[in-house]
Structures are given as C-alpha cells and as structure tokens.
Amino acid sequence: MQLRDEQGRLYTAQPTADGVSIDGTLVPAEAGPDAIVLLRGDPTRVAWAAAAKDECWVFLDGEVFTFEVERPEARRRRTATSHGSLAAPMPATVRQVAVAPGARVRQGDLLVVLEAMKMELPVRAPGDGTVVSVKCREGELVQAGQDLIEFEP
C-alpha cells in the first residue's frame, strides 16, 4: 500500500505477521481493541488510528499523522483541491478557532484545534494563503468530513 503524508513524502507499507513493514523497515505492532495499535518496543507505545475514504490518521505521543492512500484517482483529486475547505478528519469537538476570515497564514500555522478520543487534533494550514471563511465555532461538535475552514493560496 502506498501512503503519502502531509509533506508529500511517499511510503510503502505492507502488513506482516509481526507488524508493518514501512519502506522495508519492520515496525513490530499488533492490533488492539477500538482502533488501538500497540507498537512493541522498549517501552511499548500506544497509537490510535482512524480512517475514512482515502485518508488515515494516526495519533501517537500527542501528534497527529495524516496519510492518504495513494491511488491514481486520489492523486488527481488532491491536486485539484489544493485550495478549498479543510474538513474535520473524524467526529470531534472544536476546542479552539485560532484564525478569522481574511487572516494571512503560513504553511503549518494553527487554524483550529479539535478534540476527539481525549486527544487534541491540530488542524494546520496546508500552505501559505488566506482564510476565506471559518465554518465552525468553539464548543461545536463537528462530523467527519464537515468543512471547518475555507482556505485559498
């Protein structure tokens, strides 16, 4: 399976009997209950995973890693939607809205903080640009795929 992260790096991931091989390196892992993945090592670490359509989110050590399953049609769609709306990756509560319409932001700037599964999920600017509109408010429960910020480069 081909995965592409938010920075555009491409990874080849292959499930094995002992875990997952990522670009030829074995990551010892096992599935736990409720979308939990146990990363065996010293110490054993716990990651939470969530997936929808062609995207996968992994929550590990307070960080969120977003991956897109690479398919030719997905590659075309990503290019076509390099601007537009940034959507919620999963059902979550909006904890903070850090921008207002008209704000100029740089790649990686914090736009919104969501909370899901007792973890904070930062939504960051995919590139330099302008916030066109904010489509959520603090305290609101949002669903997976719901638009949060309209953004244009």
Image (tube, grey):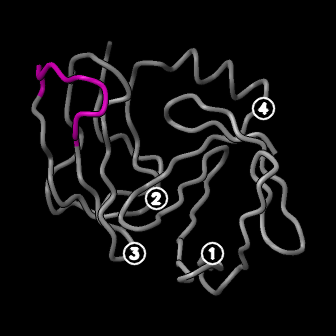
Q: Which of the marked residues, 2 or 3, is nearer the chain's N terminus?
A: 2
Mark 1 residue crowding within 10 angstroms, few (<14) / some (14–19) / many (20+): some
What's the CA distance linking mark 3 and mark 4? 29 Å
Q: Is mark 1 on a helix, strand or loop?
A: strand
Identify the residue at image location x=35%, y=22%.
127
Q: Mark 3 points at which residue?
A: 117
What's the CA distance linking mark 4 and mark 2? 21 Å
Magenta segment, which residues?
A: 101-111
Q: In the rendered structure, does residue 30 fall within the stretch colored magenta?
A: no
Amino acid carrying mark 1 in the image: Leu
Q: Mark 2 points at which residue?
A: 90
Q: In the rendered structure, does residue 109 fall within the stretch colored magenta?
A: yes
- In the image, residue 130 lies at what x, y percent? 21, 17
Mark linked to residue 71: 4
**Which is more toward the observer, 75 or 138?**
75
- Marks 3 & 1, CB-CB < 8 Å contact: no
